[in-house]
Amino acid sequence: MTEMLTAKEMQGLLQVDRSTIYRMAEAGRLPAIKVGKQWRFPHERVEKWLKNRVDAPAAPVETNRTNASLASLLPLDCVQLIQDAFAENLGVMLVITDLAGQPITQVSNPSSIYELLTETASGHTLCQEQWQHLSQMPSLEPRFMPGWGGLLCARALVRLGSELKGAVIAFGVAPQNWPPSPASLEELARSLQLAPEKLQQAFDGVVSLTAAQQKQVLLTTQRIADILAHIVSERCSFLDRLDTIAKLSTF
């Protein structure tokens, strides 16, 4: 007598849910027999069906998620809340960008100097160029380095497998010798066509961190990047699973 598999056994075999098994059986896409009100699946025919699927040429892959943008792989509303919470706790500005320096989240905990800079098109460009430079730095571990005006910034890279997808950037931290000299202030203000008085006022609000606080920012920035990498990996696995279910359902 032919051995019969149950729907539960088919679930384990195909790694899909029960409703998908029933739907495929109803549509004749699985070798199945209805015994009373229950579906049963002839073991030998199921094995042959699976072998045919394995031997069949693979359908061309329409999308490659490793090539997808970081923004398309993240639940951005959720990520923004995570970023906001960390920025508030650390007392620094945070943003997540792609490798071209394009922000995919809003800047968290924006300071007066950032708000002043982004009042102008040149200030926006300056920030993006700085973020792009940080994202493409060869160092793997986050570390503070001077940016515009001497302000310190650091980044941690977000990975998907062996692919780099973007960066978590902490920025706007005062260096050891702060504020800049009056001559440097004048030059910075002139480069952005800003009044020196306004720039000085914004500089007065720049956050200063102890060595221990800076170390915590670096560790936390990497932690955020690792969290994002995990979210992206899990989401890709989930979407791949949905693709598998869809292919099984249309076989």
Image (tube, rainbow, N blue to C red):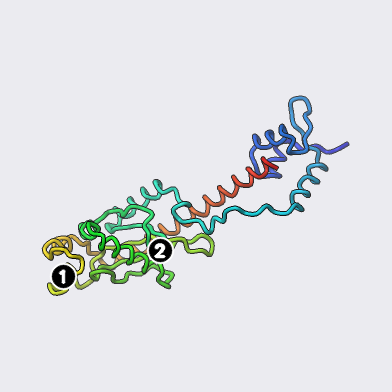
Label annotation for residue 55: none
Label annotation for residue 100: 2
Determine the residue positioned at 77% across, 34% down. 40
Q: Nearer the viewer, residue 33 or 223?
A: 33
Q: Nearer the viewer, residue 37 or 121?
A: 121
Disc 1 designates what residue?
A: 185
- Position of residue 229 relative to residue 188, above or below, is above
Is there any visible trace of residue 216 in the rendered image?
no
Answer left or right for 246 relative to 172.
right
Distance CA(mark 2)–CA(mark 1):
29 Å
Q: In the rendering, at what x and y percent does residue 234 appear?
A: 52, 51
Q: Nearer the viewer, residue 147 or 1?
A: 147
Q: Amino acid at mark 2?
A: Ala
- Say what secondary structure mark 2 lies in: loop
Specify which label sits upstream in the sequence, 2 or 1. 2
Near mark 2 (Cα within 10 A), the count class, few <14, some 14-19 or many ≥20, is some
- Say what secondary structure mark 1 lies in: helix
